[in-house]
Image: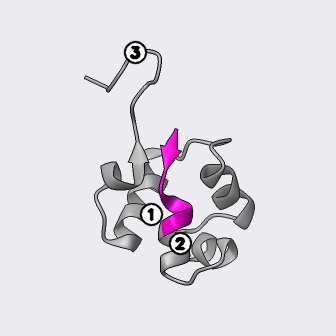
Amino acid sequence: MKNRLKLLRAEHGLTQADLGDLVGVSRQAINAIETGKFEPSLGLAWRLARHFAQPIESIFDFTDEAKGPCQ
């Protein structure tokens, strides 16, 4: 899943560890989300969106590249 997490984190001057602490996960989890190796749970996506005061959809691209946008 594509996402803008790394960009948002950098804009706010946060390290991966800082962001992980703020939302209750490890630095490794933030790295895995940023690199597309891990898709966050809905709860974690919500916490990230809430932290950045953004809709979840503006951070995460839920388009299934094989099938198109979720319907």
Between the C-alphas of marks 2 and 3, the distance is 29 Å
Q: Residue furthest left?
A: 71
Q: Is residue 15 left or right of residue 66?
A: right
Look at the numbered discs 2 and 1 and tell me whether their residues touch, using CB distance below 8 Å.
no
The image position of residue 24, as x and y in percent, is 58, 68
Residue holding disc 3: 67
In depth, the one of 19 and 60 nearer the eye is: 60
| Tag 3 secondary structure | loop
In depth, the one of 30 and 34 nearer the eye is: 34
- The amino acid type found where label 2 is placed reads Arg
Residue holding disc 2: 9
Q: Which marked residue is nearer to the observer: mark 3 or mark 1? A: 3
The image position of residue 28, as x and y in percent, is 74, 59
At horizontal 55% and vertical 84% (from top left) the residue drawn is 13
At horizontal 45% and vertical 63% (from top left) the residue drawn is 48
Point out the image quarter for the C terminus. Answer: top left
At horizontal 42% and vertical 63% (from top left) the residue drawn is 47
Residue holding disc 1: 48
- The amino acid type found where label 1 is placed reads Leu
Q: Is residue 15 left or right of residue 9?
A: right
Is 16 part of what is drawn in magenta? no
Q: Which marked residue is nearer to the observer: mark 2 or mark 1? A: 2
Q: Tell me if residue 56 comes above or below residue 26 in the rendering.
A: above
Residues drawn in magenta: 1-7
Along the polypeptide, which appears first: circle 2 or circle 1?
A: 2
